[in-house]
Image: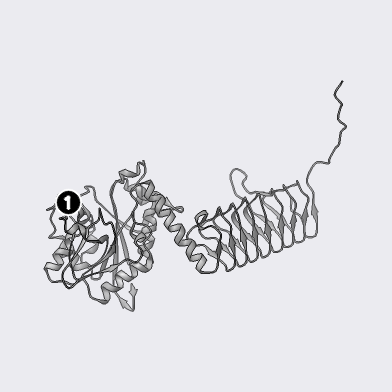
Amino acid sequence: MKIDDKESYVITIIMAAGKGSRMKTQKSKLVHKIYDKELVKRVAEIAKSVGSDEIVTVVGHLREQVQDVLGDSVKYVYQDELLGTGHAVMQAKKYLEGKKGKAIILYGDVPILRTQTLKNLVSKSIKNKEYATLLTAIYENPTGYGRIIRDEGGNIKAIVEEKDADPLQKKIKEINSGIYCFDIEELLNSLDEIKPDNSQGEYYLTDVIRIMNERGLKTGAVIVEDNTEILGVNDRAQLELLTRVLRMRINAEHMKKGVTIEDANATYIYDDVNIGVDTVIHPNTTIKSGVTIGDNCEIGPNAYIREGCKIGNNVKVGNFVELKKTKVGDRTKVPHFIYLGDCEVGEDSNIGCGTITCNYDGKHKHKTVIGNRTFIGSNVNLVAPVTIGDDALIAAGSTITDDIPSDFMGIARERQINKKRKKKEE
């Protein structure tokens, strides 16, 4: 891994063995999702984003579910007895032994840590030759967190858990996030010395800091700038809170890049979405991961842009429109009450209200291709697979099952019959 021009081998250990009983769920807490992505998968992606050479996940309760999510992208060790964070890391010893470099400790239920924050942590550890570097935070109300104990020179002496802290220590506002970067060799040496001498009878990973200080090894910390990054998920309310935090973070980034979002609280833009400048997003719009939207577009309100969509420049996607795996060309209008799935629409076309692509035959999905400068009337059903040529026109209310050549008009409906009404007998 290369951070700040200094190379070091980095292994990340993800803690993912807990039960998460407060979630009141039949599933592993870690497979619950924020924006269509499991908590533990988000953490694994954070580890990958800083260039971890190896990722080891410590699993336990409902471990099969965690493994189904992560697959073979990580290695696994098992913690069958939940005897504390130190004990969890002990299970990964076989992946640490004989290696030199850095070990990052992350948690499967702390899913919105920024990549840059983690890079800063590892970079400082490497640059300052620290044997342990902690990610800490300043909380006005630190209740429940381990306190950072520093000496008169500001060096970290120890971490004291809330339940073991005395009244003076409980007044300290700097807390331990639980996220660390360790020297691998000294971490192994320290793990051999920690003992469950505490009120819970557990092996605390925090004791590693005390042991390293007793040996005179240099330790340090990085104070996180945004405390929301270290928030964890223990129950449904916290899951909603982190979803809200991530929503605002993503929306803010798009607005910084020149996108107008009329109501950030009512706009849901998932990860990995690209939106061009001067595009306006109206309220109650959802845009799924992997979508690309061009410049000067207008999206929503009440639009649902699903995976696999690519929208050109100066496009109108109006209210109550759903797009899925659809490409829309420049200057095309998809105004309202429309579903386009597995579809490709050319430039300068207009899709009438109530139009849908019938892309699923019960077994397979099929594609609809609509050309340039095509006008689709209202309430048209396009039964895929079907191709509509350039400059074609489709009459309102038609159900199209056959291709329409360029410069042709398609009409597929019963001839209108008018019958005289019978008058009621007086």
Give residue 297's quadrant in the image: bottom right
Q: Nearer the viewer, residue 223 or 214?
A: 223
Question: In the picture provided, is 13 more to the left or to the right than 424?
Answer: left
Three-letter residue code for mark 1:
Glu
Under circle 1, the secondary element is loop
Q: Position of residue 104 (x, y in %)?
A: 28, 64
Residue shown at the point (52%, 54%) measured from the top left: 266
Name the residue at the bottom extreme: 5
Number of marks in the image?
A: 1
Residue shown at the point (51%, 58%) measured from the top left: 264
| Residue 307 versus residue 214 in the image, above or below | above
Residue shown at the point (51%, 65%) measured from the top left: 254
* Residue 48 visible in the shown view: yes
Q: Which residue is mark 1?
A: 202
Residue shown at the point (59%, 65%) measured from the top left: 279
Name the residue at the top extreme: 426
Q: Position of residue 276 (x, y in %)?
A: 57, 67
Colour mapping used in the image: one colour
| Residue 357 versus residue 8 in the image, above or below | above
* Residue 51 visible in the shown view: no
Give residue 122's quadrant in the image: bottom left
Q: Position of residue 202 (x, y in %)?
A: 17, 51
Q: Nearer the viewer, residue 355 or 422?
A: 422
